[in-house]
Image: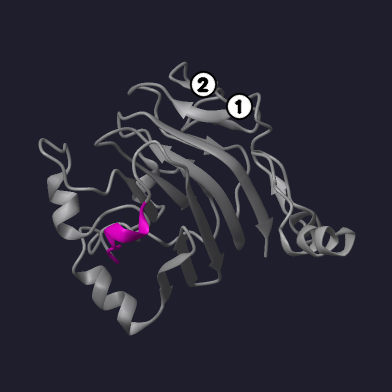
Amino acid sequence: MKSVLLFLAMAIPAFSAPNTLTPEEKKENFKLLFDGKTLKGWRTFKEKEPKAQWKVEDEAITLTGGGGGDLVTDDEYGDFELRCEWKIAEKGNSGIMWHSTEDHGAPYETGPEYQILDSFDKADHKYPHEIKKGNIAGGFYDIYPAKVEWSKPVGEWNETKIIIKGTKVTLYLNGNVTADVDTKSDEFKAALDKSKFKTWEFFNKAKKGHIVFQDHGDKVAFRSIRIKKL
């Protein structure tokens, strides 16, 4: 019996509590961007502090209502791997941007976006146009669509991974690769030309910038936010 229990203990991965690093992540030099208690290290875009709508609820960074503005990291990042969990309100919309600068009026003018959405088509959904275009959770917003089966239902935590290295972008949702592209490639340029960003002068040009949690007016929560510089 002891040998069986030992085998099971070795076979089952150790549970990692929210807002902590696994032993493997510690070895790989990941660091936490959120301590589970405070908004230290985060602020509203072009502000010195987070606005009141951004709070810590149930050990998660939570946008409790519109008007908080987009939440940005104090630090800027170039090449990195970002991991986090998120959940979105019913019929809600948000996103995670990277390489966003504060040189212009909004983070999305420079930073590409990983889409966050209640991806399931419902009566009176606030964003049916996004669902129709495939601009649902996990997608490279307005450039590469995602699939609804990759999303978890409202109320459940989704797992995201974003890897940026040079011009290479790899996005994951719940273990599924949702985009894997070199932004210098002809493939990406063709996809960009079909998007609303086609003529945006500063879009995806910065080599480093802030990581951004979007205020789209809907409640959204983030936790277990870990990053490793590459």
Amino acid type, mark 2: Lys
Which residue is denoted by mark 1 in the rendering? 39
Residue 71 position, x and y percent, is 48, 33
Residue nearest the viewer, comparing 217 with 151: 151
Q: Secondary structure at mark 2?
A: strand
Helix, strand or loop: magenta stretch: loop
Quick one: label 1, few (<14), some, or many (20+) residues within 10 Å? Answer: some
Name the residue: 38% across, 49% down. 152
Residue 94 position, x and y percent, is 35, 40
Contact, mark 1 vs mark 2 (Cβ under 8 Å): yes
Q: Secondary structure at mark 1?
A: loop
Is residue 165 found inside the magenta-colored segment of the image?
A: no
Tell me where the magenta segment starts and ends, as one range: 144-151
What is the number of the mark on residue 55?
Answer: 2
Amino acid type, mark 1: Leu
What is the number of the mark on residue 10?
Answer: none
Name the residue: 47% across, 68% down. 169
Residue nearest the viewer, comparing 182 with 175: 175
Name the residue: 72% across, 54% down. 30
Residue 57 position, x and y percent, is 53, 22
Q: Quadrant of the N terminus?
A: bottom right
